[in-house]
């Protein structure tokens, strides 16, 4: 069972984060061709992909396509960004957002660094 990650301080603009602890996305937001199976699942069965992402993160299946889910994932892996950018990406690029998270989960799982 995964341990709960409690965020007590939200990252602020200008807040110094050591370069060694910064993470990054394994693929870009629009890198659909890097894993076509995830892209096809997102395009043709979006609710299924949302549930897969939520289950991979030990969260409720209904939360897979939420701003909170993207923010939680970014926070876990120290990926730069903001709640505002998470909101915009989730609102206007929902499929790309969930596909990016799923590709990231798959790659981190293969590397053995998935929480």
Image: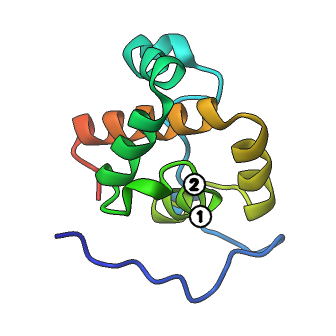
Q: Name the residue carrying label 2.
A: 70
Residue occupying the point 33% across, 41% down: 108
Above or below: residue 91 compared with residue 36: below
Quadrant where the image shows the C terminus: bottom left
Q: Which mark is residue 6?
A: none
Quadrant where the image shows the N terminus: bottom left
Residue occupying the point 55% across, 57% down: 74
Q: How packed is label 1: few (under 14 Cα within 10 Å), some, or many (20 or more)? A: some
Foreground residue, 59 or 76? 59
Residue occupying the point 69% across, 74% down: 11
Q: Name the residue carrying label 1.
A: 68
Give the alpha-carbon distance from disc 2 to disc 1, as whole Å.
6 Å
For numbered disc 2, what is the local secondary structure? helix
**Could you tell me residue 66's position as x and y percent?**
59, 55
Query: Does residue 44 appear left or right of residue 106 in this picture?
Result: right
* Tag 2 near tag 1, CB within 8 Å: yes
Q: How many marks?
A: 2
* The furthest residue to the left: 1
**Could you tell me residue 43's position as x and y percent?**
53, 19
Query: Does residue 101 appear left or right of residue 16 in this picture?
Result: left
**Could you tell me residue 33's position as x and y percent?**
52, 10
**Could you tell me residue 31's position as x and y percent?**
58, 19
For numbered disc 1, what is the local secondary structure? helix
Foreground residue, 73 or 49? 49
Residue 59 lies in quadrant: bottom left
Residue occupying the point 78% across, 37% down: 92
Q: What's the image's color scheme?
A: rainbow
* The furthest residue to the bottom: 8
Q: How packed is label 2: few (under 14 Cα within 10 Å), some, or many (20 or more)? A: many
């Amino acid at each position: 069972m995964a341990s709960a990650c409690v965020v007590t301080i939200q990252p602020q603009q200008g807040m110094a984060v050591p370069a060694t602890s910064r993470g990054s996305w394994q693929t870009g937001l629009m890198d659909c061709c890097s894993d076509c199976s995830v892209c096809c699942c997102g395009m043709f069965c979006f609710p299924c992909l949302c549930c897969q992402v939520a289950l991979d993160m030990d969260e409720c299946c209904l939360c897979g396509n939420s701003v909170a889910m993207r923010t939680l994932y970014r926070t876990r892996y120290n990926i730069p960004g903001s709640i505002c950018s998470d909101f915009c990406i989730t609102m206007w690029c929902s499929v790309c957002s969930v596909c990016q998270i799923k590709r990231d989960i798959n790659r981190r799982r293969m590397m053995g660094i998935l929480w």
